[in-house]
Image: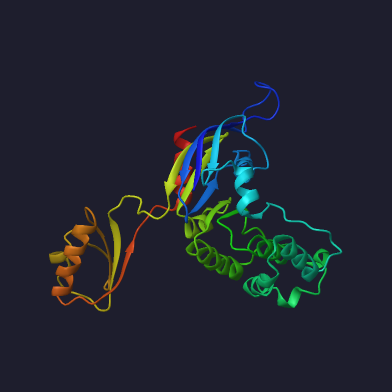
C-alpha cells in the first residue's frame, strides 16, 4: 500500500538544522494498522504530512498504491485527523459535520458517523463550548465520514476518556477490517499496543526499529488457565511455573510444542480456560530500542 524508499525531509538549507526525517524506508501493507512512535521532535508529524502529500520529500520517494501521495489523495481521498483538530468556535457540531459531508460527497453517511461517535446529544452545541474529548470525537467523525483506503490519525486518543478509548479501538478495527490502511502517531504506547499491527520507532528523524505488536516478544512464553487443578501438570509441561492452583506459566519452543503439550494436558483431565501469550510491554520494547541506539 505505502512504500517509503530512502525518504529524507529537510526544512531550510542543508546543514542549517538536522533533517526532520533521514533515509526512512518502510513497506506498509494494505489493510493494516501501523503506528509511528518516538519522542517529541522525532519526525512523526512530518512523516504523516509526507504521506498525505502536504509537503514534498527532499530526497527519496513515497508511493501510495503506486501513486505519488498528492495524486493518490486527489484521486481516492484520505481520512485525516490532525493533532489539534480546530474549527470556528461559533459553528454548531451539526453544521460543521454537514459541511464536511457535503464537501466530501458523503451526506448519506452523516447519520452513521454521528451515531458511531455518540454525537447525537452534541449536534446543536457550538464547537467552542465542547470539552477537549468531545471535540476530539467530532474530529474523528469527520475523519471517518467516508470509507477511504487510507486513514491518517495524529494522536487520536488525545482528550478521550477511558470509555471512548475502548470504543475507538473497536471503531478502528472495523475500519481496518473494511480494507483501510491506518497510520497513526501516538505517545500512548498502551493504546498503540492494543490497536496497531506494527510500530515504527523514530528518533531524531531516523527509523530505529519496526516492532511487531502482534507477536510474543520471545515467541515462547504463555500463561495457561485451568478450570480446576491438575495434580500432574509437570507431566505435560515440565517447564510449568505455578502461579496458583489453576494458573501457571510455561516456556515452549513454538506453536507445535505448545499444541502437543496442551493435548497431553487435556489427556490428563485438564479443562483449559485460557492460553495467553506473555509479551514484553511495547513501552519497554520502545525504551530498549531507543536506549540501544543512544
Q: Quadrant of residue 121?
A: bottom right
Counting from the top left corner in percent of width and height, residue 99 is at 77, 64
Q: In which quarter of the image is residue 46?
A: top right
Q: Can residue 157 be seen in this view?
A: yes
Counting from the top left corner in percent of width and height, residue 233 is at 17, 68
Instruction: Judge from the rendering whether residue 166 lies leftward or rightward of residue 221; answer left or right.
Output: right
Residue drawn at (65%, 35%), measured in percent from left and top?
Answer: 56
Q: Can residue 45 be seen in this view?
A: no
What is the residue that sits farthest to the top in this orientation? Answer: 15
What is the residue that sits farthest to the right in this orientation? Answer: 90
Instruction: Judge from the rendering whether residue 247 lies leftward or rightward of residue 270; answer left or right.
Output: right
Residue drawn at (47%, 40%), measured in percent from left and top?
Answer: 26
Residue drawn at (68%, 75%), measured in percent from left and top?
Answer: 111
Q: Which of 149 and 36 is in front in this view?
A: 149
Q: Which of 125 and 267 is in front in this view?
A: 125
Counting from the top left corner in percent of width and height, residue 133 is at 69, 64
Q: Which of 89 and 110 is in front in this view?
A: 110
For residue 234, above or below residue 281: below
Report the coloring of the rendering: rainbow
Counting from the top left corner in percent of width and height, residue 257 is at 18, 58
Residue drawn at (58%, 59%), measured in percent from left and top?
Answer: 148
The tally of labels here is: 0
Q: Which of 214 and 230 is in front in this view?
A: 214
What is the residue that sits farthest to the front in this orientation? Answer: 75
Amino acid at each position: 500500500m505505502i512504500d517509503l524508499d530512502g525518504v529524507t525531509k529537510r526544512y531550510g538549507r542543508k546543514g542549517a538544522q538536522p533533517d526532520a526525517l533521514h533515509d526512512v524506508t518502510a513497506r506498509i501493507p494494505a489493510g493494516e494498522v501501523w503506528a509511528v512512535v518516538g519522542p517529541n521532535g522525532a519526525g512523526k508529524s512530518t512523516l504523516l504530512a509526507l504521506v498525505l502529500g502536504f509537503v514534498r520529500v527532499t530526497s527519496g520517494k513515497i508511493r501510495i498504491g503506486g501513486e505519488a501521495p498528492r495524486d493518490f489523495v486527489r484521486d481516492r481521498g484520505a481520512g485525516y485527523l490532525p493533532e489539534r483538530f480546530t474549527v470556528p468556535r461559533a459553528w454548531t457540531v451539526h453544521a460543521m459535520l454537514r459541511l464536511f459531508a457535503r464537501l466530501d460527497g458523503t451526506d448519506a453517511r452523516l447519520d452513521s458517523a454521528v451515531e458511531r461517535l455518540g454525537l447525537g446529544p452534541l449536534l446543536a452545541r457550538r464547537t467552542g463550548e465542547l470539552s477537549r474529548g468531545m471535540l476530539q470525537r467530532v474530529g474523528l467523525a469527520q475523519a471517518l465520514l467516508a470509507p477511504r483506503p487510507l486513514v491518517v490519525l495524529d494522536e487520536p486518543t488525545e482528550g478521550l476518556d477511558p470509555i471512548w478509548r475502548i470504543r475507538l479501538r473497536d471503531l478502528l478495527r472495523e475500519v481496518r477490517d473494511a480494507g483501510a490502511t491506518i497510520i497513526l502517531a501516538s505517545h500512548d504506547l498502551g493504546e498503540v499496543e492494543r490497536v496497531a499491527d506494527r510500530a515504527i520507532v523514530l528518533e531524531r528523524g531516523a527509523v530505529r526499529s519496526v516492532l511487531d505488536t502482534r507477536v510474543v516478544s520471545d515467541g515462547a512464553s504463555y500463561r495457561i488457565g485451568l478450570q480446576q487443578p491438575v495434580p500432574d501438570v509437570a507431566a505435560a509441561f515440565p517447564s510449568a511455573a505455578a502461579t496458583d492452583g489453576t494458573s501457571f506459566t510455561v516456556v515452549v519452543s513454538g506453536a507445535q510444542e505448545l499444541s502437543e503439550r496442551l493435548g497431553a494436558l487435556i489427556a490428563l483431565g485438564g479443562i483449559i480456560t485460557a492460553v495467553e501469550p506473555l509479551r514484553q510491554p511495547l513501552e519497554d520494547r520502545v525504551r530498549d530500542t531507543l536506549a540501544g541506539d543512544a
